[in-house]
Structures are given as structure tokens and as C-alpha cells.
């Protein structure tokens, strides 16, 4: 997971890098992430803290095909772009909850 503001700032750093680097002969893939994996339970608990409301859940066995963990390694983003995620899970959940609370219909034009 990554905060949308960190993602946007990472995209801006990538655009700046495109302007200054000669990448005409190669294509680079750069992961933008925190470098940390979060469990579903950690996310539930952070949303409970952000909302002040309990979230019902039940623990079940891992499903066939589920991977144990998956997260982006941001090392290359820091090395090439000078970018690093600044916001953690609690800020991600608090900001997502606040936006949804204030915009229950989503983006309405």
C-alpha cells in the first residue's frame, strides 16, 4: 500500500528524471512503495482507529493461491529519483477514511 500523495510525488520525480536522463535506449521499471508489507488485520485496525468505529471481521485460513506477502522494493526509486514514501499506514487509512466520510458519493461533478 502507498499513500496517494506519495504516489503522485513519485510520479513527479519520475517525470523530472525523464527530462534529465537519456533513456531513449532503455526502459526502466521503478517501484513506488513503502518497502513494507501490511496484513489485512493491520489495515482493519488502522481503519478502526481512523473511523473510531469497530469493523467486524473473521479470521479464516489462507485461500489456495494466496501469497504470504507482497510489497514494492523502493530502493531503485530512491537511488534514481531521490524519492521515498513519507506516509505510513495510519496516515494512509486516516486520509482515505476522511476523504470517504467527506465525499460519500465519491467524485461527483
Image (cartoon, rainbow, N blue to C red):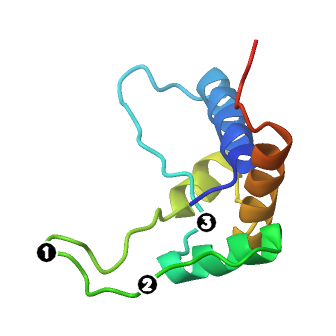
**Which mark sits nearer the N-terminus, 1 or 3?**
3
Q: Quadrant of residue 15?
A: top right
Which residue shows up at 38% across the image and 69% down it? 70
* Mark identifier at residue 64: 1
Q: Where in the figure is residue 85, as x and y percent of width and height?
A: 71, 59
For residue 109, side relative to residue 80 (left or right): right
Determine the secondary structure under disc 3: loop
> Nearer the viewer's eye, disc 1 or disc 2?
2
Picture coordinates of residue 53, whole percent (x, y)? 76, 74
Residues marked 1 and 2 touching at CB (< 8 Å): no
74 relative to 101, above or below: below
At numbered mark 1, what does the secondary structure look like: helix, strand or loop? loop
Q: Residue at x 86, y 42 (%)?
A: 102
Residue tagged 3 = 34
Tag count: 3
Q: Residue drawn 36% across and 23% down?
A: 25
Amino acid at each position: 500500500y502507498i499513500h496517494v500523495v506519495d504516489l503522485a510525488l513519485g510520479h513527479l520525480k519520475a517525470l523530472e528524471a525523464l527530462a534529465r536522463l537519456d533513456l531513449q535506449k532503455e526502459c526502466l521499471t521503478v517501484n513506488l512503495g513503502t518497502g513494507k508489507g501490511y496484513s489485512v488485520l493491520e489495515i482493519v485496525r488502522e481503519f478502526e482507529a481512523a473511523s473510531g468505529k469497530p469493523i467486524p471481521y473473521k479470521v479464516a485460513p489462507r485461500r489456495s493461491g494466496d501469497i504470504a506477502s507482497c510489497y514494492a522494493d523502493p530502493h531503485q526509486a530512491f537511488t534514481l529519483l531521490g524519492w521515498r514514501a513519507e506516509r505510513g499506514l495510519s496516515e494512509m487509512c486516516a486520509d482515505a477514511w476522511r476523504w470517504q466520510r467527506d465525499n460519500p458519493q465519491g467524485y461527483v461533478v
